[in-house]
């Protein structure tokens, strides 16, 4: 009798496991949204709309920079959800005319970080003639470096030639952001 109960429990567990695996494969979009969530959607939508940048791109940068965790400082001193350097943030705040943005609000308030980061992304898109890949590279390496690479022919600004970016960190950053960007466009088409 005990052997029968053990066998029955094993069969039930096997059926449950097979059912779970079937659901995972049939509902892969559901699983993908669990693996690739987007937090702060309303703030991302609002800031992306304000500055005419793609919300998928803002979400991809956030995912790459901090995985949606506020209060993070990088080893190099970048702050907040979108990891803006303090000097860059100060420049953005001055140019955009933002009020009451401090390092503390940038670090701890998602809405402030998203607003400042989205404005900066708009600026980079303009500087690089709406070349999103070059703007992403500039977000990481700085616009001066990217301008130099483009002007000297070191890199042509395309994702196809991303391996020509001379900074390994920036090369991998661009690949990661573009991967998340494409994943978010696929999973959240009406973002």
Image: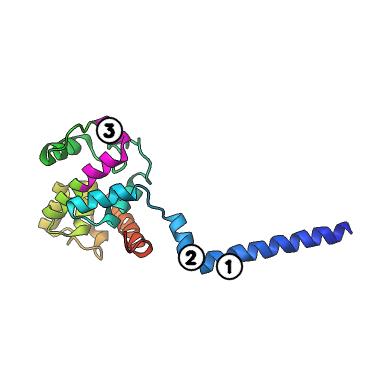
Residue at 83% from the left image edge and 59% from the top image edge: 5
Taking depth in this image into account, of 118 and 100 the one nearest to the observer is: 100
Instruction: Give the percent coordinates (x, y) of residue 177.
Output: 31, 55
Quadrant of the rendering where the C terminus is positioned? bottom left
**Residue 28, numbered circle:** 2
Decide which of tag 2 and tag 3 comes sooner along the chain.
2
**Which type of secondary structure does the marked residue at label 2 adopt?**
helix
Give the answer, above or below, for where 116 lies relative to 176. Answer: above
Q: Are marks 3 and 1 in contact (CB under 8 Å)?
A: no
Residue 59 included in the magenta stretch of the image: no
Instruction: Specify the quadrant of the image occupied by residue 106.
Output: top left
**Magenta stretch prevailing secondary structure:** helix
Q: CA distance from mark 2 to mark 1?
A: 10 Å
Instruction: Give the percent coordinates (x, y) of residue 12.
Output: 72, 62
Q: Which residues are magenta?
A: 103-118
The residue under label 3 is 105
Taking depth in this image into account, of 29 and 127 the one nearest to the observer is: 29
Residue at 23% from the left image edge and 31% from the top image edge: 102
**Which type of secondary structure does the marked residue at label 1 adopt?**
helix
Label 2: few (<14), some or many (≥20) within 10 Å?
Answer: few
Give the answer, above or below, for where 79 lies relative to 17. Answer: above
Quadrant of the rendering where the N terminus is positioned? bottom right
Total of numbered circles in the picture? 3
Residue 104 included in the magenta stretch of the image: yes
Decide which of tag 2 and tag 1 comes sooner along the chain.
1
In this picture, residue 51 sits left or right of residue 181 = left
Residue at 45% from the left image edge and 60% from the top image edge: 32
The residue under label 1 is 22
In this picture, residue 21 sits left or right of residue 165 = right
Q: Is residue 167 visible?
A: no
**Which type of secondary structure does the marked residue at label 3 adopt?**
helix
């Amino acid at each position: 009798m005990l052997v029968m109960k053990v066998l029955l429990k094993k069969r039930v567990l096997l059926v449950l496991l097979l059912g779970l695996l079937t659901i995972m494969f049939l509902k892969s979009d559901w699983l993908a949204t669990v693996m690739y969530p987007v937090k702060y959607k309303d703030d991302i939508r609002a800031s992306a709309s304000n500055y005419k940048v793609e919300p998928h791109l803002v979400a991809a940068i956030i995912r790459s920079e901090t995985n949606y965790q506020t209060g993070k400082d990088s080893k190099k001193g970048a702050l907040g959800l979108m990891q803006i350097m303090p000097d860059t943030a100060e420049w953005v705040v001055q140019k955009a005319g933002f009020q009451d943005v401090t390092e503390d609000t940038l670090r701890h308030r998602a809405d402030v970080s998203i607003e400042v980061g989205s404005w900066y992304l708009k600026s980079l898109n303009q500087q690089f003639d709406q070349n999103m890949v070059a703007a992403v590279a500039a977000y990481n390496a700085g616009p001066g470096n990217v301008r130099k690479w483009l002007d000297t022919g070191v890199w042509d600004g395309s994702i196809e030639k991303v391996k020509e970016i001379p900074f390994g960190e920036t090369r991998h950053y661009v690949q990661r952001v573009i991967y998340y960007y494409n994943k978010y466009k696929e999973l959240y088409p009406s973002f």
